[in-house]
Amino acid sequence: MSRFLRFAIVGCVGFAVDAGLLAVLLWATPLGPFLGRLVSIACGLTVTWLCNRTLTFGPSGRSRLREGARYGGVGIASSIANYLVYSGVLLAVPQTPPVAAVVVASLAAMILSYLGYSRLVFDR
């Protein structure tokens, strides 16, 4: 199985955590779609780091702390892009369900994150 396919599968897991947690937060808390997404995207990022480290790329050879910091840096950059697309969709088309906006935003950020992780975090 190709590395990109494994990355896409891990991305689906991260998406499920992100979108699922967002749905729960929207239902169970007063956070709303913008604050709730900040929480859900952070949880999804943590899950994808652990899965990408194990299933997609393997450990980088750096300490977990350095690897995690690099992953976090790339993750924050791609998460900002993801959040901007998400917010843009919700603001441009207010009737869009937040979870649908997560789909659009996650697809948009996928290539950016793959390039960053493969070249800056798990490069060999």
Image (cartoon, helix red, strand yellow):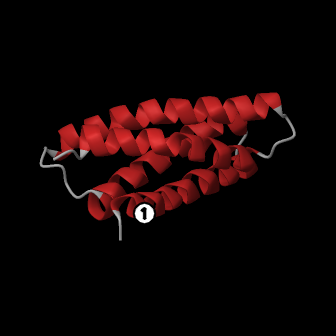
Label 1 Cα crowd, 10 Å radius (few <14 / some 14-19 / many 20+): few
In the rendering, at what x and y percent does residue 63 appear? 13, 44
Q: Is residue 107 left or right of residue 93?
A: left
Q: Secondary structure at mark 1?
A: helix
Front-most of residues 41 and 74: 74
Vertical relation: 113 (above or below) 23: above
> Is 115 above or below relative to 53?
above
Q: Which residue is nearer to you in this view: 24 or 15?
A: 15
Residue drawn at x 33%, y 43% is 117
Residue 120 in sight here: yes
The x and y percentages for residue 74 are 37, 35
> Residue 6 vs residue 58: left or right?
right
Residue at 79 percent of width and 46 percent of height: 97
Instruction: Kindly identify the residue that appears in the image at 49 percent across and 55 percent down.
Output: 14
The residue depicted at 57 percent of the width and 59 percent of the height is 16
Observer-nearest of 31 and 11: 11
Q: Is residue 87 above or below residue 49?
A: above
Asked whether 119 or 94 is in front, the reply is 119
**Quarter occupied by residue 40:** top right
Residue 13: x %, y % from top left: 50, 61
The x, y position of residue 45, in whole percent, is 44, 46
State the quadrant of the N terminus: bottom left
The residue beneath circle 1 is 5
Q: Is residue 30 left or right of residue 10?
A: right
Left or right, residue 123 beside residue 85: left
Amino acid type at circle 1 is: Leu
